[in-house]
Image (cartoon, rainbow, N blue to C red):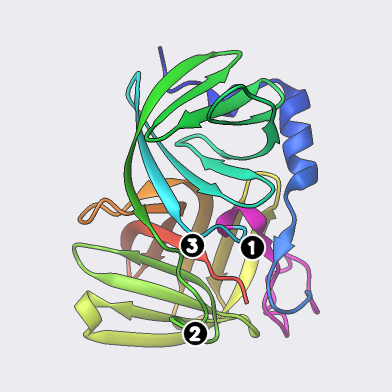
Amino acid sequence: MTLFGLSSFRPALLAAASLLLVGCAATPVDGPRPGTGQVASTAPLLPSMLFPGGAERFEAWRCTPQQDLVTAFGERELRLWSAHGAYRLAPAVVASGARYQQGDLSFWNKGGDAVVESANGRLDCSADMARSPLTREQRPGVMFHGRGNEPGWHVNLAHDTPELTLTLDYGARELTLPYRVTAMDNAQGRVSLASGLTDQPFELWLEARACFDDMSGEPFPARVTLTIDGETLRGCGQGIAP
């Protein structure tokens, strides 16, 4: 069985999911729309599925057939990230444990065990590592934080202006640069950013997918790809709500 085929669910489920995905940022968009090649005056609205949605922790699940998932349990929904996509499931009635469902996709868990089912198959999962989401207290003024290893780097997107700070080469180099939105897909949780300066080009790609730090194993709801100075760096990240 391939990776559970979460990305190939029927169009009805994808349509329902797209209606639930909304932006999340401190300020509304004011300025050129994505793809115009211009820097806006305020920070863009980022897709909701880059954020924890009020959950107290992200949890990693190791599943068979081979699969890794990330979840965030909120008061009214379960957010689920796989290698293929991101989904929001509502609570459903169950005799024991907890069950969440969205169309053909369901997630049932009791303690450290879970079963994930869809029209494409079933995953049997065990809870692994958990971590608390980053907060604005820990990252003041930041609405998205991404990071990677070998070489160590991280990126912080400001919550109010289209500006980001890159720390590269294990902290040896720091750049604060304007950016422009070149693509935005709220339904799929994808954002593409590019430099607002011609003399310092970069591209930053954020995608709502299960991600695990390749050193610590910590779970994240977003995959981050940074291309700068002819080098492509990959890591994980999360949106930080006010």
Mark 3 → mark 2, Cα distance in angstroms: 20 Å
Instruction: Give the extent of the magenta segment.
Output: 29-52
Q: Percent from the top left, x then y, of residue 148?
A: 30, 63
Residue 230 placement: quadrant: bottom left
**Category of crowding for the residue at label 2, using alpha-carbon neighbours closer than 10 angstroms: few (below 14), some (14–19), many (at least 20):** some
Q: Percent from the top left, x then y, of residue 241?
A: 60, 71
In terms of sequence position, does the residue under pointer 2 or pointer 1 come before the other? Answer: 2
The amino acid type of the residue labelled 3 equals Gln
Residue indicated by mark 3: 238
Q: Percent from the top left, x then y, of residue 197?
A: 53, 83
- Residue 33: image tag: none
Mark 2 → mark 1, Cα distance in angstroms: 15 Å
The amino acid type of the residue labelled 2 equals Leu
Q: Is residue 86 above or below residue 7?
A: below
Quadrant of the image containing the C terminus: bottom right
Residue indicated by mark 2: 177
Mark 3 → mark 1, Cα distance in angstroms: 20 Å
Q: In the rendered view, does 212 fall on the left or right side of 37?
A: left
Secondary structure under tag 2 reads strand
Mark 3 or mark 1, whichever is nearer to me: 3
In terms of sequence position, does the residue under pointer 3 or pointer 2 come before the other? Answer: 2
Residue 104 placement: quadrant: top right
Give the residue drawn at x 31%, y 54%.
218
Residue indicated by mark 1: 182
Residue 53 placement: quadrant: bottom right
Give the residue drawn at x 35%, y 58%.
235
Give the residue drawn at x 35%, y 72%.
154
